[in-house]
Amino acid sequence: MFGQIAEGFIAMFTPLTIILASVGVIAGTILGAIPGLTATMGIALILPVTFYLDPVAGIVMLTAMYKGGLFGGSISAIMFNAPGTPAAAATAADGYALKNKGYPRKAIRTALIASTMGDMLGNLVLMFSAATIASIALRFGPAEYTMLILFALVLIVTVSQGTIAKSMISVLIGLLLATINADPVTSIPRLNFGLVDLSGGISIIALVIGLLAVSEVFSTIEQHFRQKYKPDPKQKIEEDHNKAISKKDDNVTFKGLFEIKRTLFRSAGIGTAIGALPGLGPVTAAFVGYGQALKKSKNRKNFGKGEPEGIAAAEAANSGVASANLIPLVTLGIPGDAEAAIIFGALIIHGIVPGPRIFETNGTIIYGIFAGMLMASVINLLFNWYASNIYRRISFIRPTVLAPIILVLCIAGTYGYSQAAFDIFVMFIFGLLGYLLKKIEVPLVGIIIGFVLGPTLETSFRQVLVVADGNFMLFFTQPISLALFLLTLMIVINTIFRILRAKKTA
Amino acid sequence: MKNFHLRIFFAALGLLVVLAGCGVSSSGSGDGSDYPRKAVTLMLPYGAGGPTDLFFREFARIAEEHLGQKIIIRNETGGGGLTMYSRLAKAKPDGYTMAAGMGTTLYSINPHLELMDNQPEDFDLISSIFEYQHIIAASTDAPYQTFEEFIEYSKENHVRIASPALTNNIFAELINKEENYELKWDIISYDSGAEAAAAVLGGHADIVIDAPSAMLGSEEAGDLNFLVVLPENKMSTHPDVPTLNEFYDLSMSAMIGIGGPAGLPDEVIEKWDEVIEKTLKDPELIKFAENNNYTIVKKSKEEVQEYFDNQREQFGQVIDRVVEKQN
């Protein structure tokens, strides 16, 4: 095995591969940073190019682009609260707040280090223990998926800032919106109000960008007019304060990173584990990582208010997925998500059939690809580390100048994602909804997580009902499912006690 | 002053983005006599990297030489692939917006279920392209190793069938009909073929019905066992696997073709017919299809019509059962 790994590194370390990986990372970052142009679209676009390259160079370029794209999504999430890819929605929570405090470069670099950590861990697991992880992942059937998602949803509800009632409302809105799609069992469109455009469900990009970025633009407009007609002296001071933070202070420190090491490793692990399960993806990972950090961290009070630990928790988890999602592909020949499906296609075009025997038949190529992925992480780290200086400059632009630009980008991005003008309306509706919900302090991320997890929850739950012929006991007779259920129950009981105690002391 | 420049800069940037968005979709006009004068968009109702996408990317690469223009593949996956049809129906019939994927869903399922408003008359189908080779696969640990044993087993025991699409559910019901609905099959729907295959490997389902692309690796490693091929042609990579019509007077397939919005000029249809003819005979494409289990089918318009008429009727026999059972 180590011989193959060494051969793989040699096969990968060619000038062409290095150039292609760099191009992939840079192009991916730019694409990802534009809301609506996702990393997956990026790699679908360059897929035909890779047919003409040798498999290692071609696939390394694809994965480099995906990694760059995932991170690019976080850049716009931090700078504009407009997650370039849905996976960055959790990063936006603390990232945008920290940027608003005047630390854009610190926010970006924290995200970058966390992202690289998550990515590296996923990559090493992929390299050394893919087969083991895959065999565990296969044990996740419908009952386990249902319980895992229930666990994630309960976690999000109980750890959210603000009242539990409001976070429940938010998650439930998300679940409700997720029911607008094709029925998972019969594939027949339902609840679409007779609109064909809705028969495949609401576009996730329109929802995320609308809720987070467009609502933020509306708030900026409101603030501007408030400021103009009824100046608030406190606000003015805060603005001046922003400019006072020097470039030197706007940076990550070793001490700061050391303090959040637990969160970094925990989130990276969560990302890797969720990545290995087909059909869940980076959005789920990011929110579960964020939720777990909220539960465990000493700084949990500052989460959502620009806490670097929150950024790290979300980023390490969503990047952990970027390599781990290839685990089912290389060990079973099963592409777990859209990105893996595209790489699957690229392998097939080169005449390589992914499956359990791929390490024997094409070991050098596979390890070459893994090595290239590690290199892509490093390139991503270097490139964005220096580029964060440019991003810092963007943050000096006045919000009133920036708002219309962001709005244009949101519209272009939402349209670009699906090429449906209908989605632009959807985006504005969610922008308005987000703006109103913010006024009554209903957390918006709950809607996104509910929306993302809803379809898998429904599909898995209904699969259980078919398998067990309507008998709920299946949830409690499977060991993994039972364990997840008990864990969920513990969180609920724990939360009830916490609330009771808080009431007593109050 | 500095601010002013910044404003101009960003206004220009914004405009650029908008223009870039528009540039792609602008299209010229013409009577079609010098067709094609520019790149042609080929829409697909399925996502990038899936079996349909893979085939048409290879197809487009070769067809470009015969067409003399670039072919741009666009994955229109909205509405579970349904929005592609409404978008195609609204497109100008000038031959620059074409689609691959006009097949079983449009002609054989939609008339029964009315999933979308568009009817077959809204489109011009030029030619069929290929058939998917659906197979039935089981884990090698299963108590049955052949199709006959599997059928006997399912008369006595409940079997969980993982199916990633409505068409595949219909296939399962059609086989069950041959056995007078004596088979105790529970159909479990999955979002994708990959997830369905994983369910069988993990023991959460017993059988998977799908095109084999996501199963080849596991079969090679001895984890999956191919029981039967549903269409009448054997798999080129696994010629030992029997076909369904060796057991019943039944064979099933899903076919996909290339077409455009209704009212395509004759020149366009002729040109594409010629391009498709040449591309499907290209040895490179034939080799690709063989290695990856696509059955290339070049049928005339009338033959395709007949194929779908038969299929629609075949599906009609069980479609109520499929939809009702699952509601």
Image (spheres, coloured by chain):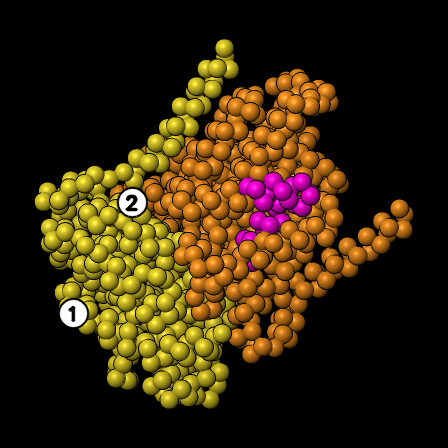
Residue A168, numbered circle: none
Vertical position of residue A499 compared to residue A189: above or below: above
Residue stretch rendered in magenta on the structure: A431-455
Q: In which quarter of the image is residue B133?
A: bottom left
The residue type indicated by label 2 comes to: Pro
Vertical position of residue A329 compared to residue A441: above or below: below
Residue A382 in sight here: no
Counting from the top left corner in percent of width and height, residue A279 is at 49, 57
Residue at image coords 66%, 34%: A306
Q: Which chain is yellow?
A: B
Residue at image coords 63%, 74%: A472
Element type where label 2 sits in the image: helix
Residue at image coords 50%, 31%: A406
Q: Do labels 2 and 1 share a chain?
A: no
Residue A274 lies left or right of residue A8; in this view the side is right
Q: Nearer the viewer, residue B326 or A45?
A: B326
Residue wearing tag 1: B303
Residue wearing tag 2: A48
User: Gap between marks 2 and 1, in whole Å?
Assistant: 33 Å
User: In this rendering, which labeled residue sits more in front, label 2 or label 1?
Assistant: 1
Q: How many marks?
A: 2
Q: In which quarter of the image is residue B300?
A: bottom left
